[in-house]
Image: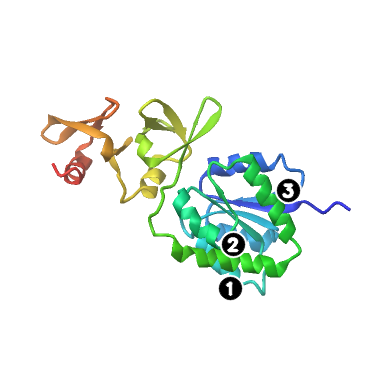
Amino acid sequence: MNLPALRTLIVDDEPIARQVLREQLETFPDVEIVGEAADGEEALRTIRKHKPDLVFLDLQMPVMGGFEVVRALGANARNCPVPVIVIVTAYNEHAIKAFEAGAVDYLLKPVSEARLRKAVARAAGLRNRPEGRAEQVAQIANAEPLLPALIGSRKIVGRGDGEYVLLDAEEVLAFQAEAELVWIVTAKQRLLADQPLHAIEQRFQGTEFQRVHRNSIVNINHVKKMSLLTSQRWLITLSNSLKVVVSKRQARSIRKLLHW
């Protein structure tokens, strides 16, 4: 007797990340994707509405993060069936040990097909075991204190030549907007970003990425030279020799940040 397909929800604030995972899962005959969500609040609403068997859950999201979603599911377990949760994360290998300690199922971005198949098979085994699903949710919640607040950096997803590329933050020299497009600039290539510049600025607020112009955000660790253009305008040269103008509005903040 064939079991019905696992009703599956994908939760990630990055549209490209959701698309990549969806395309991978669509090749699995035992998986039916019932929806997507871009943040934790939307995820909870969708879980209440569709009651999925399986949720692929990103940890770091705006509005409500993955751990908050897990805690809310645990607190409301009597009123809404708890799905199988698979963590999808860009945390580094050392942080992953926190999940391994609790036998929590996780996928490390970029997701390999072999690991994805293993996660789906494990979820199928928990489908008719509500106590097992509840225990899994508790294990994920217990893993949170083991993760230092800023350990690991999120991957930056870029698109080029028909493929998706996942970058570490230190690989990115700048983000530059051209009309409706936003480019991710690395030492060797330019890739299309999946978010507008203002969303990228909010995401990396307080990090090494600094807005220098309405069309540009730069990684200050890659600034090699600043040249004075006028009394209130500067020209930044990055480590790949790319030159970026600093607007009058941003001149003071960039000089302060660089201690100039």
**Discs 2/3, front:** 3
Tag 3: residue type?
Answer: Val
Are the two marked residues, 1 and 2, in contact with CB atoms closer than 8 angstroms?
Answer: no
Tell me the residue that label 3 is attached to.
31
Tag 1: residue type?
Answer: Ala
- Is 85 in front, or is 180? 85
Residue 196 in picture, x, y percent from top left? 43, 40
Residue 91 in picture, x, y percent from top left? 46, 50
Mark 1 to mark 3: distance in Å?
A: 27 Å
Binning the other alpha carbons within 10 Å of mark 3 as few (below 14), some (14 to 19) or many (20 upward) gives some
Tell me the residue that label 2 is attached to.
44
Tag 2: residue type?
Answer: Leu
Q: Secondary structure at mark 3?
A: strand
Q: Secondary structure at mark 2?
A: helix
Tell me the residue that label 1 is attached to.
75
State whether residue 156 is above or below residue 244. Answer: below
Binning the other alpha carbons within 10 Å of mark 1 as few (below 14), some (14 to 19) or many (20 upward) gives few
Q: Is residue 61 visible?
A: no
Residue occupying image coordinates x 45% and y 54%? 95
Q: In the picture, which quadrant includes the C terminus?
A: top left
Q: Earlier in the sequence, mark 1 or mark 2?
A: 2
Mark 2 to mark 3: distance in Å?
A: 20 Å
